[in-house]
């Protein structure tokens, strides 16, 4: 599933829905979702998708190839628009694999995971989340105590960080001391990719210590 951009780089597609299952797909970039526009789903499962291989022909705003990035979701901003990727209330982003970075999600736009189970994703680094700053981009994982809370469990990185890694952007974990996080491979969070501490209770810091 993908949202694409016009030749001049402007979004011409949006996907908004609920109670959807996106599973068992593979692509050279963005195994489950390749998003250059708006992707917003509620109570949706994105599972067992794979991003692997070369030759996708897709690039980030930096000009770098998208190959092997974003096992579950790839939010790839252009030079003119920030890709907007949101999973909400009772969603699952789990069991996805990237041969490169961002097993669960690779984000270069605006990303919110709200009440989402982020589990058992695999990548070289950023097994759960890999995020890169481009223009107005941001990254938020929200606890959502009133509904199904977010959790981050069992993500595995082969050569880097299991929970979050990236370049030039902080990912904010709302009430990190409340977000259930366990079984992720060590090390957990790149110090440059979080707002708080990596090794102790700190609002918006690394969820696992």
Image (cartoon, rainbow, N blue to C red):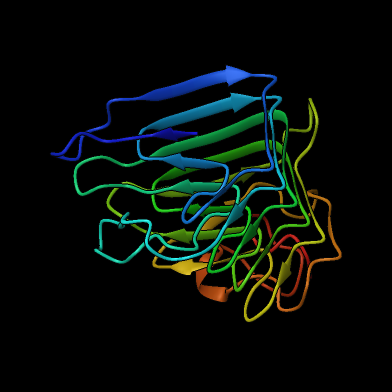
State the residue at coordinates (47%, 30%): 39
State the residue at coordinates (71%, 38%): 116
Q: Tally the marks.
A: 0
Q: Quadrant of residue 202?
A: bottom right
Q: Is residue 162 above or below residue 145?
A: below
Quadrant of the image containing the C terminus: bottom right
Nearer the observer, 170 or 5: 5
Q: Is residue 146 above or below residue 209?
A: above
State the residue at coordinates (59%, 72%): 125
Q: Is residue 186 left or right of residue 108?
A: right
Q: Position of residue 80 (x, y in %)?
A: 19, 42
Q: Is residue 130 left or right of residue 115?
A: left
- The residue sitting at the bottom extreme is 159
Q: Quadrant of residue 36?
A: top left
Nearer the observer, 174 or 183: 183
- The residue sitting at the left extreme is 8
State the residue at coordinates (79%, 37%): 149
Q: Is residue 119 left or right of residue 2?
A: right
Q: Position of residue 88 (x, y in %)?
A: 64, 29
Q: Position of residue 1 (x, y in %)?
A: 50, 33
């Amino acid at each position: 599933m993908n949202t694409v951009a016009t030749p001049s780089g402007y979004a011409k597609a949006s996907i908004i829905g609920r109670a959807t299952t996106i599973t068992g797909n593979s692509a050279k970039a963005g195994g489950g979702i390749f998003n250059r526009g708006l992707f917003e789903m509620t109570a949706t499962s994105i599972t067992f998708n794979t991003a692997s291989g070369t030759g996708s022909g897709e690039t980030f705003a930096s000009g770098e190839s998208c190959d092997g990035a974003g096992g579950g979701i790839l939010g790839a901003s252009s030079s003119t628009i920030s890709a907007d990727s949101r999973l909400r209330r009772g969603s699952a982003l789990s069991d996805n694999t990237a041969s490169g970075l961002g097993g669960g999600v690779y984000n270069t736009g605006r990303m919110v995971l709200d009440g989402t189970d982020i589990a058992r994703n695999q990548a070289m680094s950023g097994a759960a989340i890999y995020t890169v700053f481009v223009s107005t981009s941001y990254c938020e994982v929200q606890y959502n105590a009133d509904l199904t809370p977010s959790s981050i469990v069992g993500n595995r990185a082969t050569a880097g960080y299991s929970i979050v890694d990236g370049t030039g952007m902080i990912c904010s974990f709302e009430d990190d001391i409340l977000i259930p996080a366990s079984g992720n491979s060590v090390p957990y969070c790149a110090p440059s990719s979080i707002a708080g501490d990596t090794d102790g209770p700190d609002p918006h810091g690394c969820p696992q210590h």
